[in-house]
Amino acid sequence: MSKDTNAPSRRQFLTSAAALGAGAVAASAARAAGPDPLITEVQPWASGFGDGVDVTPYGLPIRFEGDVIRRNVEWLTADTISSINFTPIHALDGTITPTGCAFERHHSGAIELAKDDYRLMINGLVDQPLVFTYEDLERFPREQHVYFCECAANTGMEWAGAQLNGAQFTHGMIHNMEYTGVPLRTLLAEAGLDAAGELKDKWVYVEGADASSNGRSIPMEKAMDDVLVAFKANGEALRKEHGYPVRLVVPGWEGNMWVKWLRRIEVTNAAVESREETSKYTDTLADGTSRKWTWVMDAKSVVTSPSPQSPIKHGPGPLVITGMAWSGHGKVTRVDVSKDGGMTWETARIAQDGANKALVRFYLDTTWDGEDWLLQSRAIDDTGYVQPTKAQLREVRGENSIYHNNCIQTWHVKANGEAENVEVS
Ligand SMILES: Nc1nc2c(c(=O)[nH]1)N[C@H]1C(S)=C(S)[C@@H](COP(=O)(O)O)O[C@H]1N2
Ligand SMILES: [Mo]
C-alpha cells in the first residue's frame, strides 16, 4: 500500500488540534514533544475486557486513589480508641465529603449497634416519656439537609505556631454530608412539648449509647430550631463510625454536640454541666480565665490546593487555587485569597452558593509564574463576620487554647511548587 504523503502526520494533527483549542491551557497540556504512545498505540485496557458488573457489589475508589484516605497523627493521642483521624481534604473537590474518608472522633471507640437493638428514650420534663425503636423513627416526616460537622479541636494544634504540614492535619477534622432525619422538635412534640413560651429556659441533655456517652446540654431554642435526629448520610445508612444507626445533627455547632449512637434525650431545667462541656471543649483566654461555652463554629476557610500534600506539579502558567469555607452562623458570602501573606486580596469564585451551615467550594483561576507565595484565604459570612488572623485571635485567646481556632492559614508556596505550613506575623 502506498503512503499518502500529503496526509498530515499524527503529530502534526495533534499540534494543530491543540492550537485550535481553547487558548493557553489546551496549548500547554498538549506541549509533549514527539509521538505519545498512550495516544498512538493500542493499550492493554483496550485489548481485552474489563471487570464484570458482579465484581464490586459495593464499590471502593480505584487503587490509583489509594492515597486519598483518613490518616491519624500518632503522637496526638495515647491510643486509637479515644482518638481522631482526619479527612483528606487536600485531595477532595466539591463540597460533599465521601463517607468512607470522612474523619472520625471517638471517646471510647466506634461501637456496633444493630437497628433491632436500638432504642431512643425521651424523658425528664415531658408530659409523656417515650421510647422509640428505629422503625418508630422512620414513621415521622423526614427532612434532608447538607451540613458541615467540625470538631472544636480542628486546627487546635496550630495555636502556638505552625505545626502540621498538611491541610488534612491542620483542617481535616471536618466533614460535610447530606443528612436525612426527623427534626428533634417533632419528637419532643410527640412527648408533649411544643414551642410554647414555657419551654424557653429549658434544655435537652443528649447522650450516646457508647461507654463514653458523650453527654451534652443543648438549649431548648436550638433543640426546637434545626437539630435533626438523623439516620442517613449521603443517601445511605450512617456508617458505624459516624453513629449507626442514629446520630444527632446540630447544624453549625461544635462536633462534640453531634452525639452518635443517640440513646437518650432528657428535658431539663438547666445545663447538666457534664465532663464534655466543662473540662473539655471550653476556651482558655489570654488572661487565664475560660469561656463557659462556645457552641457555634465561626467562619473559617482553608486553601486545599496548592497545599503541602498537594504541591504544584506543573511549570509556570495557569493555576487553579481551590479550597473550602464554612460558617456555623449561616452562609459564606465571600472568600478572598491572598498570595502575599494578607497584604493584598483577590475575591475568589464560590462554585455554588446558598449553603447554610455547609461547606462552599471556592476557586481562584490564576497564573503562577514560579514565584514564592504566602497563600491565604479568608471567609466572610452573611453576618458580616470576617475570618480573623492568628494574631487577632491570640490577642483574645493567648497561646494556651486548643479549641475553636478559626484563624487564617498560610501556606508558603515555593519556586519548586512545594508548599509548607508557615505563620506570618
Ligand atoms: N456518642 C458519642 N458521640 C460523639 C462522640 C463520641 O465519642 N461518642 N464524639 C464527638 C465528637 S468530639 C465529634 S467531633 C463528633 C465527630 O463525629 P464523626 O466521628 O462523625 O466525625 O462526634 C461527637 N459525637
Ligand atoms: Mo470533637
Image (spheres, rainbow, N blue to C red):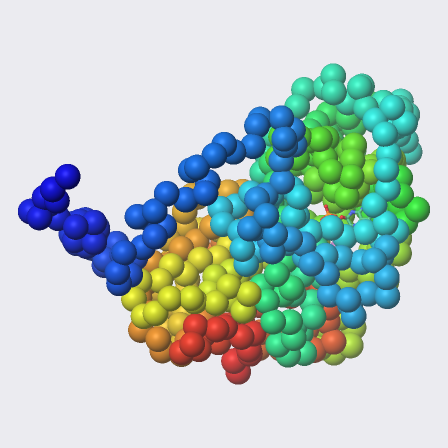
Q: Quadrant of the N terminus?
A: top left
Residue at 34% across / 69% down in the picture?
A: 315
**Residue 356 or residue 198, whichever sits in front:** 356
Residue at 89% across / 56% down in the picture?
A: 275
x, y percent for residue 409: 54, 69
**Residue 202 showing in the rendered view:** no
Residue at 50% across / 42% down in the picture?
A: 355
**Residue 377 or residue 283, whichever sits in front:** 377
**Residue 147 or residue 315, whichever sits in front:** 315
x, y percent for residue 73: 73, 65
Measured along the vertical axis of the image, is residue 249 above or below residue 34?
Answer: above
Residue at 64% across / 79% down in the picture?
A: 161
x, y percent for residue 80: 83, 58
**Residue 110 showing in the rendered view:** yes
x, y percent for residue 269: 87, 41
Extreme residue toward the front, this view: 1
